[in-house]
Image (tube, rainbow, N blue to C red):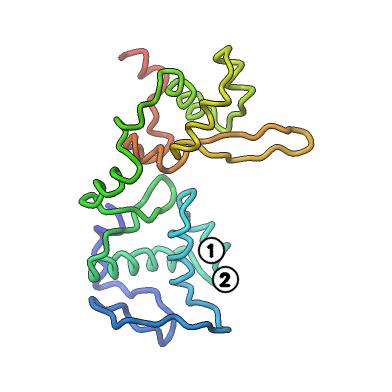
């Protein structure tokens, strides 16, 4: 069961003292410059909005002073409840060991029009091979991928980065000059995977 589906009406919502519960139709608020830090709930929402790797409770607690894992769960419930009441097109959903801010299913066509559906990506067989190597060997360097394929993979890697299917996950240091690549949340989403653990295993592929 996802946080969006969990009944939370009877559970206390995590919010700051004096912070009103979000209403179904909130009054317009004009943002003004302030010296006071934003409320933790807004910081958490900003972390989800930025994207990247799924936001896990331990990472959120490191970023937000005083936040505890139970409060993190309550905050996710609070955001989803507010989004439902306000009719927002997005929700916070679990992905792997963390959470991501994601469009609701009925709004997926909008994203497909902007970025193209899977069938519109038109990946070449070579690109599919490189993507599979990154997925199974990540973090993987260009040198490693070239060695397995026996061919130059630089242009294909850049293509996959542009498609948002892979990204640089580690930049080389003085000992390792090459960057390493890994798959992105968009890769998981496009291939309907909750996490990398859902990738077909070798024995599964042999049965196909």
Whole-number angstrom distance, CA of label 1 to CA of label 2: 7 Å
Q: Which mark is residue 61?
A: 1
Q: Which mark is residue 97?
A: none
Residue at 32 percent across and 80 percent down: it is 21
Residue at 39 percent across and 25 percent down: it is 123
Q: Dot 2 lies on which element?
A: loop
Give percent across and percent down for residue 142: 61, 26
| Residue sticking out furthest to the left | 106
Read off the residue under disc 2.
65
The correct choice, above or below, for 128 with respect to 82 in the image is: above
Is residue 47 shown left or right of residue 19? right
Q: Dot 1 lies on which element?
A: helix
The correct choice, above or below, for 38 with respect to 76 in the image is: below
The correct choice, above or below, for 77 with respect to 2 in the image is: below
| Residue sticking out furthest to the bottom | 18
Q: Nearer the viewer, residue 28 or 207?
A: 28
Quarter of image, res 173: top right
Q: Quadrant of the C terminus?
A: top left
Give percent across and percent down for residue 184: 46, 40
């Amino acid at each position: 069961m996802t946080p969006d589906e969990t009944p939370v009406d009877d559970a206390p919502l995590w919010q700051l003292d004096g912070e009103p519960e979000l209403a179904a139709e909130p009054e317009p608020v004009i943002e003004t410059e302030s010296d006071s830090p934003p409320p933790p709930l807004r910081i958490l929402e900003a972390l989800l909005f930025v994207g990247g790797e799924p936001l896990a409770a331990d990472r959120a607690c490191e970023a937000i002073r005083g936040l505890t894992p139970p409060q993190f769960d309550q905050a996710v419930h609070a955001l989803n409840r507010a989004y439902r009441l306000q009719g927002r097109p997005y929700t916070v959903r679990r992905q792997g060991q963390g959470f991501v801010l994601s469009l609701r299913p009925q709004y997926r066509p909008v994203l497909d029009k902007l970025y193209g559906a899977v069938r519109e990506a038109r990946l070449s067989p070579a690109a599919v091979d490189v993507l599979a190597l990154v997925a199974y060997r990540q973090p993987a360097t260009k040198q490693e991928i070239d060695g397995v394929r026996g061919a130059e993979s630089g242009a294909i890697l850049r293509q996959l980065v542009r498609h948002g299917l892979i990204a640089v996950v580690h930049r080389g240091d003085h000992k390792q000059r090459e960057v390493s690549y890994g798959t992105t949340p968009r890769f998981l989403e496009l291939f309907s995977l909750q996490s990398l653990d859902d990738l077909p295993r070798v024995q599964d592929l042999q049965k196909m």
